[in-house]
Image (cartoon, rainbow, N blue to C red):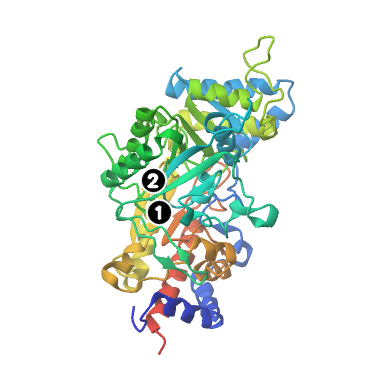
Amino acid sequence: MSGFEYRLDLYEFLNANRNKILADGEKVAADVGVPDDLKGCIGLSGANSSYPGTLRRDVLDAIEEAATNMRPVQYYGDQIRRVVKSVYGDDYDAVPTSTCEGALLTTYESLVSPPTMGRGDTYRVRMISPYERHIEHHLSYGRPFPPRYKDVFADRGATAGELGITGRRLENVDIVVVPLEGASYDVHGIKAYSCPLLLGVDADASVEKLRRAAEIHSEFLGAMVSLAYDTPGYGYEAKDADGVPVLQRGLGDIAAEFGVPYVADNAIGIPFIGADPRKLGADVMVYSMDKVAWAPTSGLAIGRADSIVQMRRAMGVHSQRYGTTAVHGKGMTVSLDPGREAMSGQLAALRILRDEPERVTRPVDETYEIIVDEYARVKNSLGEGVRITKSHNFGGVEVNYEDTWANGSFGVPIFSHEDRIAGSNLIDIVMAGAGVIPSGTDDANIFINPGLGTVDESGALIEERMCLAVRGMFSAVALLAEWADKGPG
């Protein structure tokens, strides 16, 4: 890319020419050729709370059956626990929740947040986490430390509430944010903000940095926290002999060393097929089951039984004082109970993941082949800096173009997470104009998975629809690359 002295100049140029870019986007729409009856009905990913994927017929049947029988809610919760134990063993347990955020809140409230009972002021604890992508989810439950990160969530969905700053922050929990070694946090975007660019993460050096942070904050240490993803764009490319990301295994080891929980947020992840909490050393791993696990809107926490029992008590689903193995009563976070229909659908999805994993992995493999083929069409426009990675944990494929900016050159424009929230991500806008529902395209990283109008009722991939969605994405990226290459002249 040429003609710009600073990144600021590039993004000012793109913003000034927004209308012309959108006019060119109409040509993209014509070239992609999404039929009128499919426009706005197909997308890159069902792994989005705003656009969750469709449910398979067998999951819908399970929900309908549950809605018309006389089984108590406890039955579905206990069956979910039995499925989880059949895979991970009796030392592990599970608790379903209404959402993944509900699972995170329950985890932090029951395992990390200090007690509020007792005389005098309550003490504070600190959770330590790498500075990675999507920290507004798993890190927004406390006050950021050091103070330079106090506004890190200011423009994100974590900051609803009074004056837009209340967010999810627990009153006695602090979050220690640790930048990763080898990562860069360059400022990009029309709504410019630091973008975690994580292809260059040095996992071993980062683990040591996190261990030093644990030592510094040991007096207040309450937990280690991270995502549980496994792709290069999230900084988890380096893996050990068991295929476990070195960074996550290191966090588990640090947590064990200091006697605190390791909480792994695997929202866009699949139980059983993907990241294994036993191998990571995670005390609790949480999932958003409606994203890539093909369940109805619900969350799930899987972890060591001694941790999960505390969460079950907080949810009010563990037992009554007079003695039962499980019951749906009135616990601290009982408002996060998912209900019968969601639990029955989640149970059906978990059984498929355990017994027929190929029904989930096959569409991912087929999507990967489509993406590789479609990339070949635009490779000359985007250059060699695009990395395509398949992940069964992710239930999809990651397309990362961070390396188009290698060696100090200007590459494909990178839009910040704040651009997505503000509606100034031009890749998303062009894609939507072509009739394709965008996925997350922020921080030079694009996630694609089957599910949003691209599968049939059995979950099988509808290849021609996925081809259209992927073609729309690559065409939008190529258009922005072309505009950036024009330069201010």
Is there any visible trace of residue 37 in the rendered image? yes
Where residue 144 appears, as percent x and y from the top left, is 50, 49
Q: Where, quadrant-wise, is the N terminus in this rendering?
A: bottom left
Where residue 199 appears, as percent x and y from the top left, is 32, 55
10 Å neighbourhood of mark 1: few (<14), some, or many (≥20)?
many
Disc 2 residue type (three-letter): Ser
Residue drawn at point x = 35 percent, y = 84 percent: 3
Where residue 444 appears, as percent x and y from the top left, is 41, 62
Regarding mark 1 in the picture, which secondary structure is present there?
Answer: strand
Residue drawn at point x = 44 percent, y = 58 percent: 446
Q: Is residue 208 above or below residue 315?
A: below
Where residue 31 appears, as percent x and y from the top left, is 49, 74
Q: Foreground: 156 or 446?
A: 156
Q: Where, quadrant-wise, is the C terminus in this rendering?
A: bottom left
Q: Which residue is mark 2?
A: 391
Q: Is residue 354 above or below residue 442?
A: above
For the residues labelled 2 and 1, say whether their Cβ atoms are less than 8 Å apart: yes
